[in-house]
Image (cartoon, rainbow, N blue to C red):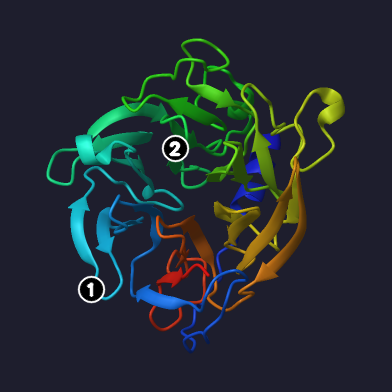
Amino acid sequence: MLAAVLMLAACADDPAIPDATRTAPPAPAEIPGFGPAAEIARDIDVPWGLAFLPDGVALVAERDTGRILRIEPGRAPEEVYRVPGVAARGEGGLLGLAVSPRYPDDGFVYAYLTTADDNRIVRFRLDGPADPIFTGIANTSFHNGGRLAFGPDGLLYVGTGDAGEPDLAQDPASPNGKILRLTPDGAPAPGNPTPGSPVYSRGHRNVQGLAWDSTGRLFAAEFGQNRYDEINLITPGADYGWPEVEGAGGSADGYTDPLLTWTTDEASPSGIAIADQTLYAAALRGERLWTATLTGDTLTDDRAVLDGTYGRLRTVTLAPDGALWLTTSNTDGRGDVRSGDDRILRFPGQ
C-alpha cells in the first residue's frame, strides 16, 4: 500500500495540465544583472539538455526525438546528431548533455538517455557512433534524473532519480537516487567515498540540477514529493535523507539538510546555474526563475523573476561569454503551449 501511495504522490509532483491551450507570445523580460532577453531559437521539441562547445555554439537535446541541435544566434537550428536507442515515455527520453573539457583534443559529447531497458550515459563524436559508458540506471516514466556536468576536477557528475522506488536512494549498490562521480570513460572516479563505487552522495529523490560556485563547491537541485523542493550543498559521502526526510529536519538523524527549500507548487526545480554569488534555478511547475544569494554556506534573499512570463522553465546555464541561457518546457505534455514554444532564450551579461 505504501508503495502505491508513494507512486501516486510521485505522479502528482508536477501534474499534467489537461486541454493545453495556445496563448500569445510572452512580453520581453529581464533578469537582474543581465540584459534583455533575445530569442535564439523557437519551435524546439521538448528541449532538455544544453551544453556549449568551446567556440560558444550551443548543443540542445530534444527529449522525445533524440535529436541534438546546433544553436547559435542568427542561424536556424541545425540537427547535428541523433542519439540512437532513445525510448521517450513520460519524463524519460534524451535528457542531459555535457561536452568534454578536452573537446578540442577528443571531440566527445556525452548524453544521458532513457532506453527500453534502463537509463544510461553514452559518449560520441558528432560524426561517430554512440558508445555506452555507464548503464543499468533503473528507469520508469518519472524520476529519471538526467543531468550531466563536468566538474572543475574534470570528472563527470550525474544526477539520477529513484525511478519511483524510494528505497533505491538509500541502497549503496544502486545508482538510483544518487549523484554519481565518474571518470570520462564512465568508471567510478578515484577518490569517491567508497572505493570502486560511482556514488558520490545518496538519499536523493530526483536530481536535475548541478552547478559549481567559484570555489569549486557543488550544488544540486532536487524535486520534492508533495512538500518541499530543495537546493543542496553536496559533500562527498553525505546522505540527503530521501525517503526518510523531505526538506529540512533530518540533521539530528545524520542526514544533511538543504540550504534552501520551496513548496513544490513554487518550484519543481530542474536546471541550476551560478554566476558570481547568485544561484539561478529554473522552475517547471512554478513557471519562474528563482535567484538566491550565496553567502558562505547559506543561500539567502531568494526571489522569483520571469514569473509566468515564459511558462515552464527547464534548463538554465551560463555560456562561455557570460550570458545566461534559458530553455522553456511547455511542449512536454504538462504546460500551456504558447506560440513559438519551445524556445531558447539568451540574456547577455552586463
Q: Residue 298 or 169: which is nearer the viewer?
A: 298
Image coords of residue 302 (percent x, y): 74, 60
Q: Is residue 17 left or right of residue 98?
A: right
Residue drawn at (79%, 23%), measured in percent from left and top?
254
Vertical placement of residue 10 versus 62, above or below: above
Looking at the image, is mark 1 or mark 2 nearer the viewer? Answer: 1
Q: Residue at x 34, y 66 (%)?
A: 45
Task: Find the residue positioned furthest to the front.
Answer: 350
Residue occupying image coordinates x 38% and y 61%: 47
Image height of 31 relative to 316, above or below: below
- Residue 240 in the image, given as x and y percentages of width and height: 70, 32
Residue labelled with disc 1: 76
- Mark 2 secondary-structure assignment: loop
Locate the N terminus by quadrant.
top right
Q: Label 2 is placed on what type of residue?
A: Asn
Q: Which mark is residue 139?
A: 2
